[in-house]
Image (tube, rainbow, N blue to C red):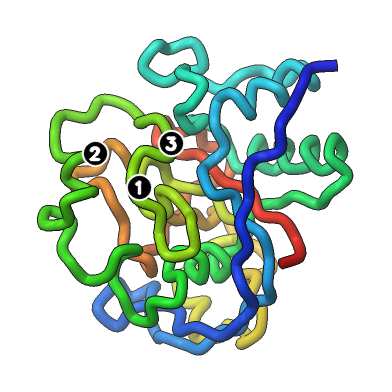
Amino acid sequence: MPRFAEPECAPVPAGYFLMGCDRGRDEERPVHRVWVDGFQLGINPVRNQEYRAFLESTGHPPPPFWNDPAFNHPEQPVAAVSWFEAVKYCEWLSNSSGRHYRLPTEAEWERAARAGREGALYVWGDEPPHEHRDHVSRWGGEVKATLPVGGGEPNGWGFYELGENVHEWCADWFQRDYYSVSPERNPRGPAGGERRASRGGSWRHHIRVSRCAARSSIPPHFQYADYGFRVARDGS
């Protein structure tokens, strides 16, 4: 049986936070108070070396770009996986480890990204990306693919790249006006839809980092070169 290693996780404490941004897009409003139970989140997006164990164990076909030298370094985040493939990885990891892994919800992702910084635009605060030294040092030049994970500064709770490198699939269906009807405790998105929610920035965008509150979505079967995921685990 192929060897596997569980992605390293760190705790996100239970608590309330203000979700959304009055200075953002329409789907980020209204800003609303949300409670999230404590959970564990991967400190990095899932890497190629971790995803390889899933492929070898299950025989699942690799994603596009798997053999592309620009994307296949073991430390790069796995890219071009669909939402369905991300869920299958979590199911496989759960069965292999005996612990319940899953995708984070939008609320969990934003809670982890903010790390207690209420109202901050970015994981580091309000400083614009072109003025933030760590961001410029990693993303300021020509970028043709993802970067190996863990190369920048972690946020206040120890998470790397929440907002950059790849968009990250979330568990929720996406609904543009969901915040107007969202429950206060542990919101999990609407019951159905056509697109799955995602969070975070992209190596191929002009501005290669996203704000903490920025929302995105695509159909769940799409396999884009700037889409990856990180795992969540129940319990704090």
Report the residue marked by disc 2.
Answer: 138
Circle 2 sits in a helix, a strand or a loop, which is it? helix
Closest to the observer: 195 or 115?
A: 115
Observer-side mark, 3 or 1, equals 3
Q: Earlier in the sequence, mark 1 or mark 2?
A: 2
Q: Is residue 219 above or below residue 119?
A: above
Circle 3 sits in a helix, a strand or a loop, which is it? loop
Q: Is residue 61 above or below residue 95?
A: above
Q: Position of residue 116 (x, y in %)?
A: 45, 77
Q: Is residue 122 left or right of residue 63?
A: left
Q: Residues within 10 Å of mark 3 (few under 14, many from 20)?
A: some
* Residue at figure coordinates x 15%, y 29% from the top left: 142
In the picture, residue 34 is in which quadrant?
Answer: bottom right
Q: Is residue 64 above or below residue 107?
A: above
* Residue at figure coordinates x 77%, y 38% from the top left: 93
Q: Is residue 201 left or right of residue 160?
A: left
Amino acid at dot 2: Arg
Q: Position of residue 150 (x, y in %)?
A: 42, 40
Q: Which dot marks residue 164? A: 1
Q: Is residue 18 above or below residue 225?
A: below
Q: Is residue 191 left or right of residue 158?
A: right
Amino acid at dot 1: Glu
* Residue at figure coordinates x 34%, y 50% from the top left: 153
* Residue at figure coordinates x 35%, y 63% from the top left: 123
Closest to the observer: 74 or 225?
A: 74
Report the residue marked by disc 3.
Answer: 149
Q: Quadrant of the C terminus?
A: bottom right
Circle 1 sits in a helix, a strand or a loop, which is it? loop
Q: Are marks 1 and 2 in contact (CB under 8 Å)?
A: yes
Q: Earlier in the sequence, mark 3 or mark 2?
A: 2
Q: CA distance from mark 3 to mark 1?
A: 10 Å
